[in-house]
Image (spheres, helix red, strand yellow):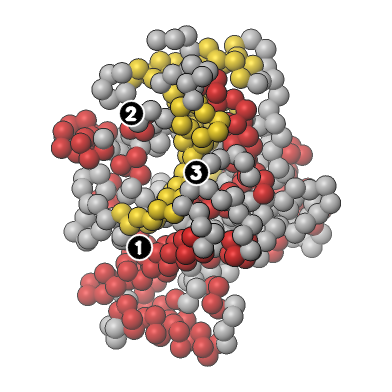
Amino acid sequence: MVDSVVTVKQGKIKGSVQKLLDGSPYLSFKGIPYAQPPVGDLRFRAPLPPTPWSGIREATDHGPICSQYDFSTNQILNGSEDCLFLNVYSKSLKANAKIPVMVYIYGGGFMSGSGNQGSYGPEFLLQHNVVVVSMNYRLEVLGFLSLDTPEVPGNAGMKDQVLALRWVKENIAKFGGDPDNVTIFGESAGSVAVTYHMISPMSNGLFHKAIAQSGVCIDDSGIATGAKERAFRVAKLLGKETTDVQELLRFLRSVPATKLANMTFVTETADEKLRGVPMRFGPVVENKFMNTEAFISEDPANAVLSKKVNKVPLIIGYNSAEGLIMLADQMTKAERLNANSSYLVPRELVQKVSFDKMKDLGKQIMNFYTGDKGMGNHDTAQGVVNMRTDMHFAYNIHRFTHLYSSLEAPVYMYRFDCATQLNVVKNFIGLSHMPGACHADDLFYFFFNELNKEIVTSQESLRRIVY
């Protein structure tokens, strides 16, 4: 195996040799800084390129994850604001190898997650002659605060991803990768991010193919609203009440990073608690300011319609039973939704119809999926799953695909319906008896981790599914 020291633009890094499941070796480089630490006055701002280092930097361990709330364990994870690191995995370091590159953007509602190998092990993908890159990006308030000012216009977390893609373009050849053959792919919020990069002028030329799994930027959940007002609510919850934007910014920069985690649910309006999914800190349509580069300054759907896109081949789709992930939550809200089905109407429609029409649409939606039985009982559980699958995933994914295909770009659409022991999410939430693939079930066919390790390594039949 070749020496595991690589010279990137900022200096030398030393990785480690790891093994795939078949015993063959690959090279792992973890915790590579792709930006300056976004701390102090850089908090909430667009990231700056990393500074060089001297000597050889060890790249055998992941960098810190970003401070966040982990909704899978209901815990605050301290992490660090200094979290802008990426990881590179490759089977060859030949500079002229020109191996296709796959850059993964993780999901988690823009409020939790990381690119770490613990969740997104590259072992399956590396068997197919690709270089795999994963990254961290800032989350929730730290990554998506928007004050509608030149200093904090929003989308810092998306601009983190852009800087990571620029790093890949500049350095990936040193890891055997082809900087002119980069595929970005992501799931859920990561898929929303992928489709944003397809329309962002900042991302132009940084990738050449895209894979969007279970999310698009034109869905309600992909576009944050009321961002400035939400920022003031954050400060009030933390003990600071003000109407001055600069005073607000000074205060929010003084708060420990962990205090800014888990602000999504507590800043929701009464309407938001029942309508849509809880992705409240996320990408925004930025206002244009002098000397400030916007990630996105136009409504995403309008951008596609007006052909302002980075036109690349696209694979896009969703899982057949995405809504399984929401079933338990819907059961707890069933009484209120049965009493006021207008909350089933997506925000995009609410903004365009009268109150009476909204009520009528809500009744039609409820009747279509659950008949006269309503939500909250065993007989209509499948109808609720279908409703949420269509409402939050299938409809807008089909819509985005239709709009994008009109540009005559190559589009390949899928609907993932596989159900095996690798459907870890569905099985974990106790719904293995229900048909289809749950939200995030597809991840365990792509990535090796502790949740599928025993299944994959102990059953040859399932190993064939993965490979």
The vertical placement of 221 against 446, above or below, is: below
Reading the image, the residue beneath label 2 is 127
Q: In the displayed structure, does residue 69 sit left or right of residue 56?
A: left
Q: In the drawing, does residue 333 fall left or right of residue 196? A: left
Answer yes or no: is residue 278 visible: no
Q: Which residue is mark 3?
A: 209
* Mark 2 → mark 1, Cα distance in angstroms: 32 Å
In the rendered view of the protein, which quadrant contains the N terminus?
top left
Please, what is the three-letter code of the amino acid marked with disc 3? Lys
Circle 2: is it few (<14), some (14-19), or many (20+) Cα within 10 Å?
some
Query: Where in the figure is residue 338, as x and y percent of width and height?
Result: 38, 81
Tag count in the figure? 3
Residue under label 1: 323
- Label 3 CA crowd tier, 10 Å (few <14, some 14–19, many 20+): many
Q: Are marks 2 and 1 in contact (CB under 8 Å)?
A: no
- Write down the quadrant of residue 355 in the picture: bottom right
